[in-house]
Image: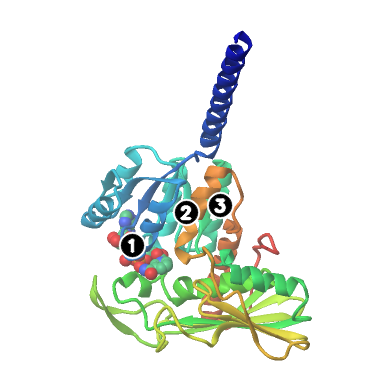
Amino acid sequence: MDTNISRKKFLENTTMAAVAMLLKSAQGFATETQQKKIRIGVIGCGSVSTQYLPHLEKSPYVELISACDIIPDRAKKQAAKHKIPNHYPHIDQMMRGPNFDLLVNLTDMQEHGRLNKQALLAGKHVWSEKPMANTYKEGKALLDLSREKKLRLWGAPAVVNSPQFAFMAKSIREGKLGQVSSAHAHYGHTGPTWSAFFYEKGGGSLPDLGVYNLATLTGLLGPAKSVMAMTSIVTPERTVDNKGKIKVDAEDNAMVLMDHGNGVISHVQCGFNYFDPFGHEGKGQEKPSITIWGTHGNMGLVGYDWAPSGVDLVTHQNEKSQRFVPDPGGYVWQEGASVIAQSLSKGTEPLIAVEHALHVLEIIEAARESGNNGKKIKIESVFKYPIV
Ligand SMILES: NC(=O)c1ccc[n+]([C@@H]2O[C@H](COP(=O)([O-])OP(=O)(O)OC[C@H]3O[C@@H](n4cnc5c(N)ncnc54)[C@H](O)[C@@H]3O)[C@@H](O)[C@H]2O)c1
């Protein structure tokens, strides 16, 4: 009897001990998996914020702290919609408000450099929409400042994150195309209608649209060593929502040639005068927007590189075109700032690199210069290549 009782007690005790142990390890697991949330301040509550905020809101690595826009009503509305506790009409006020870790800059292109600098000086990491600065010099100074302050700085786009980019990079690396020789990329539509900055000095189709193709082609073929370009203005006057009739100052039509070394030459064309029945997103378009040729094969990226829907590959062994990676998986172009928050939270290095964004900015500036003076422009910046 005594033995039974003690056995029963023993069993009860061991069961309780096991439950306690399980609970303890579950708690440990919960603590371990409870992510450090990156506190975010978003500046610029216009068109693209409607794409970013729902993605950021869903991220387990993000706590949205503040929203800011010089049009105060926009900041107020986005704050209410996405449960952001603070909203401000000016960056100075946002910086004086509750602390945050990462500034997500979604303002006019011409404002990026100035605001990114102010954020770095205030001790914030920065994710910036493209371009990360107005000039290469300004971008380089920002990178130096971020290093000096032991902060991180990143610039859009996020095209290197797509599984289609990874597939193309791998195919090139494995020699599926033989010796790569040439590539073409294009992206255009009939131009944004809501804001004038796209057409003002510092704007243009290169930093707004060409930037994606430039990031993809340099990401796949390596840093550009030199650039030649032609640029033009096809539509000298436009009507936009925020300013009515405006004069177009920045190029709205561009062709850029890049020399990647080893004989590899590529070409990017972009513009705000491209009619496309498939619309701005190119959804349903079956023709590739990017093609890369080599001595043994060629491959085409279906859809635009910021929202790809497959890669068509032909090789000398398989002459019938075959489509790979038709599914983008979890990748969406809106993910940039969320991916960065995850990396900051976990202490991991993302594929997106500021040196790559800076390199693309140098190419854009060189293309503008070459477009003006007709000369070939040398590129000095590089980034870690291959990316994947
Ligand atoms: N709209 C898109 O689909 C899209 C997609 C990808 C990237 N982008 C990029 O996102 C950026 C913003 O584009 P958008 O289309 O959202 O423009 P937008 O005009 O709709 O929004 C920009 C917002 O920034 C605000 N702003 C400007 N200067 C500011 C300042 N100093 N402080 C605070 N707020 C300020 C404006 O008031 C405006 O509300 C651009 O770099 C653009 O290239 C836009």
The quadrant of the picture occupied by the C terminus is bottom right
Nearer-the-camera pick, 84 or 104: 84
Give the mark nearer the N terminus: 3 vs 2.
3
Pointer 1 residue: 50
Question: Of discs 3 and 1, which sits in the foreground?
Answer: 1
Cα gap from disc 3 to disc 2, whole angstroms: 21 Å
- The residue at 34%/69% (across/down) is 197
Residue 385 on image: x %, y %: 70, 63
Pointer 3 residue: 143
Give the mark nearer the N terminus: 3 vs 1.
1
Q: Residues within 10 Å of mark 2 (few under 14, many from 20)?
A: many
Cα gap from disc 2 to disc 1, whole angstroms: 14 Å
Cα gap from disc 3 to disc 1, whole angstroms: 28 Å
Residue 163 on image: x %, y %: 60, 68
Residue 126 on image: x %, y %: 47, 50
Left or right: where does residue 386 sit relative to residue 149? right
Q: Secondary structure at mark 3?
A: helix
Residue extending farthest to the front is 1
Q: Is residue 49 above or below residue 292?
A: above
Residue 71 on image: x %, y %: 24, 57
Pointer 2 residue: 338
Quarter of the rendering containing residue 258:
bottom right
Nearer-the-camera pick, 279 or 188: 279
